[in-house]
Amino acid sequence: SLYTGNGTFGKKITYKSSVKSTQEIAHSLAREGAPEGSIVLADEQTGGRGRLGRAWQSPAGTGVWMSLILKPNIPLQKAPQLTLLIAVAASKAIEKVAGLEAEIKWPNDILIKGKKTAGILTELQAEADSIHSVIVGIGMNVNQQTEHFSDEIAQIATSLAIEGRQTYKRAEVIGVLLQEIETLYRQYLENGFGVIKLLWEARAFSLGKRITARSVTGSITGYAKGITEEGVLLLEDDRGQVHSIYSADIEIPSP
Ligand code: BTN
C-alpha cells in the first residue's frame, strides 16, 4: 500500500497506466458505491480535465494524477470548503516532501515561487440538497523538467523537480498527500472549517493584494479582503463595494 497511515484513505486503489481522466473512473466507481477514501491513479491521462473546462496536461510518469472519493455528511453549499481543505493538504505535502514553500492562489492553485505546480478539481454527485460523493481530482507536477513544458506553459508552470533540483518518488508524494488530506479531513468533520480557514489564509498568495477576478460574466478588479466561512472570495472594488466571487480566475494586474 502507498499509504501506511492509520486511516482508510488509499486502501482501495484503482491504478491504470493510461486513461482519459481519472475523474471519469472515480465518478463511475462512486456511482457503483465505492467507499470513502477510494482513489484512482494513472501514469498518464490523455484527456485530463482542469477547472473551467480547460485541459490538464498529464504526460506519462511525470506527475501525480489522482482522484479521491469523499462522502462527507455536509450540506451542498459547504462543498467549496473541501476544495480549500485539499489545497492546504497539497501545499503541506509539498513542504514535507520537498521542503519547498507552496502558496495557494484562490481557490485552489498551488504555486511555488509564483508558478503553478498543482491544481484541484472538485466535482459533486448530489441529489437535491444532499451530497452523495465528492470527487476530488488532484494534479501535481512532480518530475517534469523545463523542456517538458511548452515555452508558453513554462512561463506559468513549474514542478517539484524544477524547484527542488532533484526528482521525487511519486509513490512517496501520494502517500504524504493522502496522509495530509486524511488528517485535515477528520479534523474538519470533527471541528468544522475554522482551523482549515486559518491554515488556508496563512498560505494564501492573493489575499491582501490588488487582483483581477475574471470569469465568463466579466472581470472585477479590487482588493482581495479574505474568504468567507463558505470559502467564497471577498473582493472590494475601488468604489468600496464588496463582491462575493464564487468562481473565477485570479490575476495580479501589472501596475
Ligand atoms: C485545475 O487547476 O484546473 C485543476 C486540475 C486538476 C487535474 C487533475 S489530474 C487528476 C484529475 N483528473 C482530471 O482529469 N483532472 C484532475
Image (cartoon, rainbow, N blue to C red):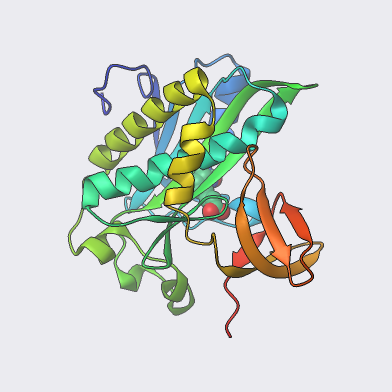
The location of residue 215, given as percent across then percent down, is 74, 62
Residue 243 or residue 252, whichever sits in front: 243
Residue 104 or residue 125, whichever sits in front: 104
In the image, is 99 to the left or to the right of 231?
left
Q: Is residue 195 visible?
A: yes
**Furthest-front residue in view?**
240
The location of residue 67, given as percent across then percent down, is 48, 35
**Furthest-bottom residue in view?**
255
- Eyeballing the image, is 119 above or below 213? above
- Identify which residue is drawn at 31% across, 49% down: 94
**Furthest-left residue in view?**
166
- Identify which residue is drawn at 61% across, 64% down: 250
Residue 84 or residue 140, whichever sits in front: 84
- Identify which residue is drawn at 68% across, 54% down: 234
Quadrant in which the N terminus appears: top left
In the image, is 214 to the left or to the right of 239?
left
- Identify which residue is drawn at 28% across, 49% down: 95
- Eyeballing the image, is 223 above or below 102? below
- Eyeballing the image, is 69 above or below 202? above
The location of residue 208, given as percent across then percent down, is 55, 63
- Eyeballing the image, is 90 above or below 150? above
The location of residue 134, given as percent across then percent down, is 59, 28
